Image (spheres, rainbow, N blue to C red):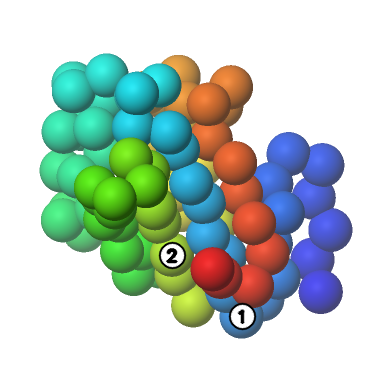
Amino acid sequence: MKIKSDFVTNSSSSSFVIAYDAITMTQFEKLMEWVASDKNEDGWRVTFEEEYRLVKGFTYMDNECIKPIIKELNLEDIISFEEGGW
């Protein structure tokens, strides 16, 4: 298992949630563009759960490739990473 001070992860999966009301439309659109790009090397899937008003992300890999876009979009203070999925 990997131990990191800024993200919770293990070698098999990683996930996050963001309250939809906390993310701007521009941030959300840029995040979704990143998900569809070649930069998404770990196969992140990101969805909007309307019922819970949450943006959710999940991968079976780790979160190394997503760290740059999280920092670029200034999402560090509103994102919550969880270990092992939903």
Q: Nearer the viewer, mark 2 or mark 1?
A: 2
* Residue 17 in picture, x, y percent from top left: 48, 46
Q: Is residue 44 left or right of residue 30?
A: right
Query: According to the image, label 2 marks what residue?
Result: 58
Where is residue 3, by image quadrant? bottom right
Q: Is residue 61 left or right of residue 48?
A: right
Query: Tag 2, which secondary structure?
Result: strand
Q: Is residue 81 visible?
A: yes
Q: Is residue 50 left or right of residue 62?
A: left
* Residue 7 in picture, x, y percent from top left: 69, 46
* Residue 85 in picture, x, y percent from top left: 56, 70
Mark carried by residue 24: none
Ranked by sequence position, the earlier of labels 2 and 1 is 1
Where is residue 18, by image quadrant? top left
The kind of residue on which mark 2 rests is Phe
The kind of residue on which mark 1 rests is Ser
Query: According to the image, label 1 marks what residue?
Result: 12
| Residue drawn 45% across the image and 69% down it | 59
